[in-house]
Structure formats: C-alpha cells, structure tokens
Image (cartoon, helix red, strand yellow):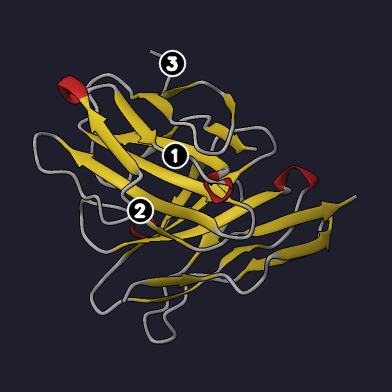
Amino acid sequence: AQRVTQPEKLLSVFKGAPVELKCNYSYSGSPELFWYVQYSRQRLQLLLRHISRESIKGFTADLNKGETSFHLKKPFAQEEDSAMYYCALRGSTLGRLYFGRGTQLTVWP
Amino acid sequence: GAGVSQSPSNKVTEKGKDVELRCDPISGHTALYWYRQSLGQGLEFLIYFQGNSAPDKSGLPSDRFSAERTGGSVSTLTIQRTQQEDSAVYLCASSLGPGTEYFGPGTRLTVT
C-alpha cells in the first residue's frame, strides 16, 4: 500500500543553519514525489517535484529509491522558511496524492 | 479567474445538520480534488474528478459524504448528519495536468 511518512511533526533550527525535513515512502512501482508548503494563512502550494530536479527557494530534494526517501534540504535556513511542509506521492500520472502528516518548520532568528 | 475559490470560508454547524461546501476550480482545469486537513492527521484524500470519467470516491470516510461536479466545473461536497469528528479544513484543488494542482483557501468546518 502507498504510504508517506514524515517522522518529525516539529522541527526547529536557527537562521543560517542547515535544515533537513525527512520523508520516507512505500510504493511498489515508480512514484512521483512532491514537497508542498503552507505558509501561515496561505494556501497549500507546490514547492518542488522530483522529476524537475530543480532548486526552489534554496531547497532541494533527491529521490533515493534504495532508501525510499525524498528528504528536503536547505543549507542555510531563513526565517521566511518557517511553514508547514508536506511530502506527497502520486502513484500514477493522474489521480490522487498521498500526503504525509506534515512537518512544522520553525526557523528562529 | 485568480485561482481556486471555495465557499464559505468558515462554517459552524450543529451536530446532525447537513452542510454543503463549494469549490470553483480554475477555468479549464479538468481534474478536481477534495482533501480534508485535520490537526495531526495531515491531508486526507476524499474524492477526485477527472473530466467525464467516473469519480474516484475511495477516500470518502462514510456514506454521509458525497460530492458532485456539475458541468465539469463547480463542485459541491455535501456532508449529511454532521458529526464532531467531521470538523476540519476541507481543501479543494484543481489541475490541468499531473503535478500541477492548485489548492483553494479551504473551508474551515466546525461541528458543535
């Protein structure tokens, strides 16, 4: 069965410190992985997707099929990165997303 | 349009009442999704519409929940005989293709 696990509900770092938000998944085929972000009082929005292999707002995420992980990383966290982050999986080109429970990131000044 | 819109933004209802939540997707988007966001539960899939295909209702938690999409555009999520555990933020999203979902602001439902 498809499952997305984000082991940390809360994560706090200081400004300028590296940050890594963990995401592990289970899926029998070749999934598409995403990170979504929700800033305070804003809509949920796509941050990045693994097939794009791009860096958005300094964040990157590499799909590790061996470890079934898709951790989100940023070398130098900023206060404006404070938000709720959701890892998500799609098992087919169309259809629903499977979301993790989210990690609330707080970046302290 | 500016994006996906949802109404009402907030809804407080008494246990046992029926509620209707509305979603206006981005014009031309063929796919429409409903999710539920609860504290500690993350985002829970409810239902998915794609064009004229039969909807994927596999996420609806009980037969008190139903949804329709009229004319391939506006969607209404109906919850009958609401229960306190239905309290959550209900999110709608639409997309033109895979991986391009745009989410609405949500409807916060409180069942008292």
User: Can the viewer see residue A3?
Assistant: yes
Tell which subunit mark 1 falls on. Answer: B
Residue at numbered disc 1? B81
Relative to A92, residue A1 above or below: below
Classify mark 2: helix, strand or loop: loop
Spatial distance from mark 2 to mark 3, Cα to Cα? 33 Å
Could you classify mark 1 by the number of other residues whose Cα lies within 10 Å: few (under 14), some (14-19), or many (20 or more)?
A: some
Name which of mark 1 and mark 2 comes first in the sequence.
Answer: 2
Q: Amino acid at mark 2?
A: Ser
Image position, residue A106 (x, y; %): 78, 54
Image position, residue B31 (x, y; %): 24, 36
Relative to B71, residue B61 above or below: below
Name which of mark 1 and mark 3 comes first in the sequence.
Answer: 3
Q: Nearer the viewer's eye, disc 2 or disc 3?
A: 2
Residue at the (42%, 78%) spot, across then down? A64
User: Can the viewer see residue B100?
Assistant: no
